[in-house]
């Protein structure tokens, strides 16, 4: 506040927390003029802040430095070579070492025999899974590339931009699915899947969804399992990327899609994906695909033509470092100690800066890597533009929707993990300022 009790971000006597939609055109303009001056001062600082991707911070990566020390040339030979056929330095081990399969199965809440452990990227596993369906089909069905009609995927949105990019890459038509705090709109999903044989899959991030942070309700999981797809090769593409990424205790609980599908008589309906990318090293972890025994057998037969086995030494490193699910949980608590304060700080800035203005709403996730922000219609692109011009890089507006097209231009994915806490506070101030300015510009146009 200034000495005369006039808020320092206005040029009139309008309280700074007055909802913008109640202001006169003159008051809106006065607010925008004052904020523009503040924006110019910040832009002059030549900031270089980046919140575009959900990357682990260097301090998080440091937590896994001991992973580099668990193997050396002096490592006990028994670890590397139980018997000649299992020499981890050699070819073989198509589905992964038994120990790595057990570790990833525990993270994914499935059986080790239902798991294939792969190299570092779960995204590459998803890519390959779609590619195999396109070229060779699923469960004896016609390969998608040979169908005389478009192949379609359901895409819950806001959602994961790389899912959408992958789908577009394969020429698959994307159908937007509305979402809520329960997960995807299951009335819509059921109507589409059960009546349209051209729909072959749906992308799901069921726990701490990217970017909303929502965890699917038990009823949503059950309704997924009870689908009666018109297409025999329809599958749930269940990207369980944040299975152990709690920020609070207790975190969210996700019902087992495997158990629900088995109970519903749909045992083969699901593919699940996960990795240690945000557990150990983002670029040097291990990933896994899980599914029913029948699906795993089919995938293994096809996979044998692509590889003789993934990096078993890296699998051993992860087993020695993380040990088991209890070890994973203990390690993730260290991550949470670094990440949770960043989420708290950014949410506090949103609350304090925007909470009373009625120009946006945002999620408060208990885990994962993102906050989903929805501003007024027709403001998201402008917010991102203003932020970039002042030195803050955000995820492109529209990226959280199929084809990069947010129908109302309102959603922005916020990734608080990578910047330091001090940088995050700078970014938060600038983000709030840009949201205010973009909102005022829209309201002035409508006034």
Image: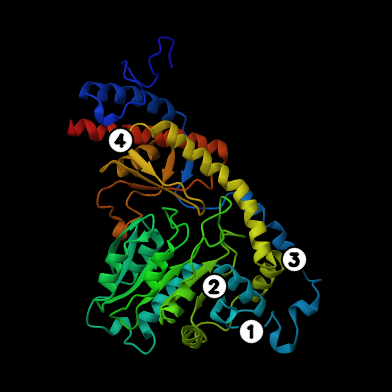
Does residue 122 appear in this view? yes
Label whose residue precedes the other's in the sequence (1 or 3):
3
Mark 2 neighbour class, 10 Å CA radius: few under 14, some 14 to 19, many 20 or more = many
Residue 77 vs 370, above or below: the answer is below
Q: Which residue is mark 1?
A: 91
Q: Which residue is mark 4?
A: 438
Compared across the picture, whether 313 is left or right of 275 comes to right
Label whose residue precedes the other's in the sequence (4 or 2):
2
Circle number at residue 70: 3
Alpha carbon separation for disc pair 1 and 3: 22 Å
Alpha carbon separation for disc pair 3 and 2: 22 Å
Residues under numbered marks 3 and 2 in contact, where contact means CB atoms less than 8 Å apart = no
Q: In the structure shown, which secondary structural element does the residue marked by tag 3 occupy? A: loop
Label whose residue precedes the other's in the sequence (3 or 2):
3
Q: Position of residue 38 (x, y in %)?
A: 39, 25
Circle number at residue 288: 2
Question: Number of numbered discs present?
Answer: 4
Residue 187 vs 296, above or below: the answer is above
Residue closer to the observer: 214 or 383: 214
Q: Quadrant of residue 265?
A: bottom left
Label whose residue precedes the other's in the sequence (3 or 4):
3
Residue at image position (33%, 72%) is: 170
Compared across the picture, whether 48 is left or right of 106 comes to left
Image quadrant holding the N terminus, namely top left
Compared across the picture, whether 100 is left or right of 438 comes to right
Residues under numbered marks 3 and 4 in contact, where contact means CB atoms less than 8 Å apart = no
Residues under numbered marks 2 and 1 in contact, where contact means CB atoms less than 8 Å apart = no
Alpha carbon separation for disc pair 3 and 4: 52 Å
């Amino acid at each position: 506040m200034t000495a005369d009790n006039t808020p320092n971000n206005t040029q009139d006597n309008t309280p700074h927390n007055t909802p913008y939609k109640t202001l006169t055109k003159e008051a809106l303009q006065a607010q925008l003029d004052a904020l523009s001056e503040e924006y110019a001062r910040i832009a002059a600082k030549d900031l270089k802040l980046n919140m575009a991707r959900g990357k682990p911070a260097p301090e998080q990566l440091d937590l896994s430095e001991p992973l580099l020390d668990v193997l050396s040339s002096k490592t006990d030979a028994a670890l590397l070579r139980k018997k000649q056929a299992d020499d981890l330095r050699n070819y073989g081990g198509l589905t992964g070492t038994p120990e790595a399969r057990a570790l990833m199965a525990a993270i994914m809440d499935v059986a080790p025999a239902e798991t294939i452990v792969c190299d570092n990227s779960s995204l590459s596993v998803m890519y390959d899974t779609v590619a195999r369906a396109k070229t060779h089909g699923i469960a004896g069905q016609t390969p998608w590339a040979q169908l005389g009609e478009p192949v379609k995927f359901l895409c819950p949105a806001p959602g994961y931009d790389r899912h959408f990019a992958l789908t577009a890459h394969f020429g698959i038509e994307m159908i937007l699915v509305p979402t809520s705090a329960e997960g995807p709109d299951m009335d819509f999903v059921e109507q589409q899947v059960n009546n349209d044989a051209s729909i072959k899959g749906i992308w799901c991030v069921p726990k701490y969804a990217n970017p909303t942070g929502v965890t699917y309700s038990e009823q949503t999981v059950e309704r997924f399992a009870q689908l009666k797809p018109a297409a025999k090769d329809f599958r749930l593409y269940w990207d369980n990327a944040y299975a152990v990424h709690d920020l609070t205790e207790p975190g969210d609980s996700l019902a087992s899609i495997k158990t629900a599908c088995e109970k519903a008589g749909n045992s083969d309906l699901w593919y699940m994906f996960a990795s240690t990318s945000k557990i150990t090293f983002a670029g040097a972890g291990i990933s896994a695909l899980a599914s029913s025994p029948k699906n795993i057998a089919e995938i293994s037969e096809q996979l044998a033509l692509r590889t003789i086995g993934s990096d078993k030494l890296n699998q051993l490193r992860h087993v020695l470092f993380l040990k088991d699910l209890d070890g994973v949980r203990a390690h993730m608590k260290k991550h949470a100690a670094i990440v949770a304060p960043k989420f708290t700080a950014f949410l506090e800035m949103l609350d304090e800066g925007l909470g009373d203005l009625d120009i946006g709403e945002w999620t408060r996730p208990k885990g994962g890597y993102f906050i989903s922000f929805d501003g007024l219609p027709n403001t998201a692109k402008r917010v991102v533009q203003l932020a970039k011009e002042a030195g803050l890089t955000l995820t492109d507006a529209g990226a959280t929707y199929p084809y990069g097209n947010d129908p109302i231009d309102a959603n922005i994915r916020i990734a608080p993990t990578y910047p330091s806490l001090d940088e995050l506070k700078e970014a938060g101030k600038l983000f709030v300022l840009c949201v205010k300015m973009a909102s005022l510009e829209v309201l002035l146009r409508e006034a």
